[in-house]
Amino acid sequence: MSTNTDLDKDLLTTQDTSKLTHIVDCPDDKENAQAWVDEAKAGGLELTALCGHTWVPESDPVRHPVCQVCLDIAQIRLA
């Protein structure tokens, strides 16, 4: 029997996670998550998404579908 964690790992290994829009936590010293992403983009800083994917933001996230694993984690946190 699969668990949600198993399904999430399967999803991450079968998708090109670089072609997804990811969700990040907002550090306490930042105004909001978008400000953090903008700062990382301008400074070439690496971010870590809720799903664990790491990247340096470069492209417009609106062009890509949202990472389902990040979305699931965010919804659980907001519940």
Image (tube, rainbow, N blue to C red):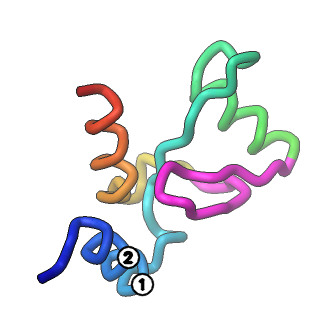
Q: In the image, what residue occupies the spot 68% across and 26% down?
A: 27
Residue 70 percent across, percent down from the top left:
39, 51
Residue 35 percent across, percent down from the top left:
66, 24
Q: Nearer the viewer, mark 1 or mark 2?
A: 2
Q: Which residues are magenta?
A: 44-59
From this viewpoint, which residue is outermost toward the left? 1
Give the answer, above or below, for where 6 lies relative to 72: below
Looking at numbered disc 2 in the image, what kind of residue is underneath it? Lys
* Residue 45 belongs to magenta span: yes
Q: In the image, what residue occupies the spot 17% across and 79% down?
A: 2
- According to the picture, the residue beneath numbered tag 2 turns out to be 9
Q: Which mark is residue 13?
A: 1
Assign the N terminus to one quadrant of the image: bottom left
From this viewpoint, which residue is outermost toward the front? 1
Q: Quadrant of residue 24?
A: top right
Dot 2: what SS? helix
Asked whether disc 1 touches disc 2, contact meaning CB atoms under 8 Å apart, the reply is yes
Between 72 and 66, which is closer to the camera in this rendering?
72
Residue 12 percent across, percent down from the top left:
40, 75
Q: In the image, what residue occupies the spot 23% across and 66% down?
A: 4
Give the answer, above or below, for where 58 lies relative to 10: above
Give the answer, above or below, for where 71 lies relative to 16: above
Q: In the image, what residue occupies the spot 35% across and 39% down?
A: 74
Residue 33 percent across, percent down from the top left:
58, 28
Q: Quadrant of residue 34?
A: top right
